[in-house]
Image (cartoon, rainbow, N blue to C red):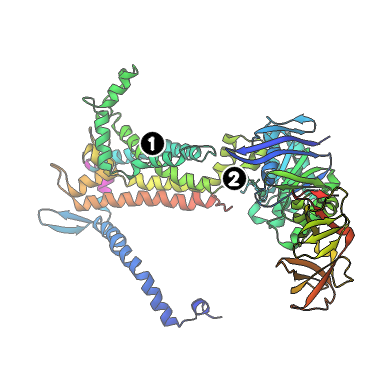
Amino acid sequence: MSEVKIRNLHKSYGSVDVLKDNNLIVENGAFVVLVGPSGCGKSTLLRCIAGLEPISSGTITIGGKTVNDLPPAQREIAMVFQSYALYPHMDVYGNMAFGLKFAKTPRPEIDARVAEAARILQLEPLLKRRPRELSGGQRQRVAIGRAIVRKPQVFLFDEPLSNLDAALRINTRVEIAKLHKMLAATIVYVTHDQVEAMTLADKIVVMNKGRIEQTGKPLDLYYKPANLFVAGFIGSPAMNFLAATVKDGKTLELADSQHLNVPLPAASKPGDQVTLGCRPEHMRLGGDGTLALKGTVDIIERLGETGFAHIRMATGQTIIAEVRGDPGTSPGASATLSLAPAQLHLFDASGQRLG
Amino acid sequence: MSSPHSAIVGMGRATYLRLLVFFLAPAAIVYTVFSIYPLLATIFNSLYLYHSETKSYDYVGLGNFTTLLTDTTWSVPFWNAFRNNLVFFAIHMSVQNPIGLALAAMLSLPRLRLRATYRTLIFMPTMLSVVIIGFVWQLILSPLWGIAKLFLQTFGLGFLFAPWLGQEGSALITISLISVWQFVGIPMILIYTALLAIPEELIDAATVDGLNQFQAFVWVKLPLILPTIGLVSILTFVNNFNAFDLIYAMKGALAGPNFSADIMGTLFYRTFFGNQLQLGNASMGSTIATMMFIIILIGVMTYLFVIQRRMQRYSF
Ligand SMILES: Nc1ncnc2c1ncn2[C@@H]1O[C@H](COP(=O)(O)OP(=O)(O)OP(=O)(O)O)[C@@H](O)[C@H]1O
Ligand SMILES: [Mg+2]
């Protein structure tokens, strides 16, 4: 069992609280991805799990053992860094064997483990090379190899693909997914990249300002974001938000006095301030007008088969809607946007999901 | 194939050459006048013998060098100075550079406070005039009014005190240590800078691999800064074999007692310019200067061709 449990984790640098009351369970064999805007504390959380940063309060258990006071090497974790952090003065073999040598692992055992990792990662022909004689992707594989040979309970990745070019990033992403299956490894993975998060994760953890905003399966976060932050963060282009007031049991009044008939939760009272959210991919240009917004076409971005229309409302706010094929309109024209009723999100005044 | 200059800047060959001369000339002229010419003149001088009676120069080939190395009037002081200079260098290598390394390692500790203050204080003596340093240490160590004796007595260690600067056995070591104190900031800063260039993540990786701070220093940082340590060593060597001022400031040209602190620089000074009853001898002075040049050349060449070639520089 290599489950990671984080309970009431708090971390501050002096008077700056970087992580506030974080609770997280990483199940055995799960691939958990931490996402969030820059500076929200993803790396710090990962480094706390690794033991590279002391925590201020709370507990971290790995495989049922509380590791708060254990140094990184005794936590049975392995970490892959963004810059790879390979030892420049050692060859590939040396890089992978270094930690094992320090742990006084018998030589035949070291050789066997390194050979195994090299086989999995196709590093066999490169064992005698120094890091600077390797390409970015090869260095990345060595860094992963160095993690594998430790046979850790948990793998920690901090933005491992961000130094690779686009094509290699997709390749390596797939490799990591395969590796996860093959090793049945428990992984905590930090990334900026939504696609990485959505494709790799069993569970995504969205962080903001040192707090965990929501934890859930990728599609759950997409279809049922718990609050405005998660709704705006997951998905690209981001979800459109419209400020609105509840008129009666089934009507919303928007800031520009348009009315929309939307199924509202029973608890909502006339006069409540709410935010209506709708993703660009759940909007359509034109339509019958039962659930429609009116505005003016600002620009149309064409990406090929699909594109994005920027529609300006009377309030000056711009709404982005996905268009497929020929949009049949041009900048300056007035436009009607149809919303898919099943794909609307409502948030209360404090930003929490309604219904 | 087009020549590189036109390919790069698209100008005519003549213009390019004129520009080349224009930019190179100032450095070339200064270097020639102040370095190459004096060096050649010195070597040239060492091949002639000056006769003070007739005020004339005779070409003697390597005769001066034979005299310097075999005639006991010259060879005894020469080998004495050479040996002392080796001791001087050995003390710097074994005391100054390890301490500089240790200080740099401590300065780069992640949780150190007052870092800038330490750095400035330790580097301070390097910027002071040698004359002041010599004078201050003479005062401190003076058996008559120096505070060193009182200081030791305060701790009941007065019996340890000796007039270190005045004894044949300890004068050179004492001066060497003062020089170490003065210059320890230089290896410290050079090594500190090299340490700063090592990325944090590398040390994090070593920590995950089970190394503590000290082990990470020995097994990861140290191998990566070896080129800098090599550079520091060769700088120390060149500076030590060119040293003169501190010993002259503290002990005068005679580098006493009984030449016990005499090094190549002071020997050269006495020989070339003369001192008290000794007349200046430009020929023998130049011969000693040329020997100093050869010794330093051998040292630097050995470093460049034997040691540096085996070292790798790392970029991160
Ligand atoms: N040593 C430190 N002292 C003080 N504050 C720090 C320190 N290290 C990090 N922080 C702060 O902690 C916060 C979280 O940093 P962290 O590196 O975890 O962010 P991140 O989510 O990984 O960001 P990014 O996506 O840019 O890597 C930041 O606001 C940062 O300024
Ligand atoms: Mg980070």
Provide the residue span drawn in magenta. Answer: B66-73
Considering only vertical position in the picture, is B79 above or below A329?
A: above
Location of residue A239 by image quarter = bottom right
- Cβ of disc 1 within 8 Å of ligand 1? no
> Is residue A1 positioned above or below A130 on the image?
above
Alpha-carbon neighbours of circle 1 within 10 Å: few (<14), some, or many (≥20)? some
Kind of residue at disc 2: Glu
Q: Secondary structure at mark 1?
A: helix
Judge: label 2 CB < 8 Å from ligand 1: no
Q: Would you say A159 lies left or right of B262 here?
A: right
Residue under pointer 2: B200
Per the rendering, the mark at residue B91 is: 1
Which tag, 1 or 2, sits closer to the chain's start? 1
Chain letter of the residue carrying label 2? B
Image x and y of residue B275, in percent: 16, 43
Q: Give how far apart the Cα atoms at labels 1 and 2 are.
A: 33 Å
Residue A169 position, x and y percent, is: 75, 58
State which chain disc 1 sits on: B
In percent of width and height, residue A184 lies at 85, 43
Q: Nearest the camera: B122 or A345?
A: A345
Residue A14: numbered disc: none
Q: Is residue A241 left or right of residue B245?
A: right
The quadrant of the rendering that contains the N terminus of chain A is top right
Mainly helix, strand or loop, the magenta region? helix
Q: Secondary structure at mark 2?
A: helix
Q: Is residue B21 above or below residue B203?
A: below
Task: Say which amino acid is labelled 1.
Answer: Ile
Residue located 28% across and 28% down the image: B164
- For the residue pair B257 and A236, the one nearer the viewer reads as A236
Q: Residue at x 44, y 39 (%)?
A: B100
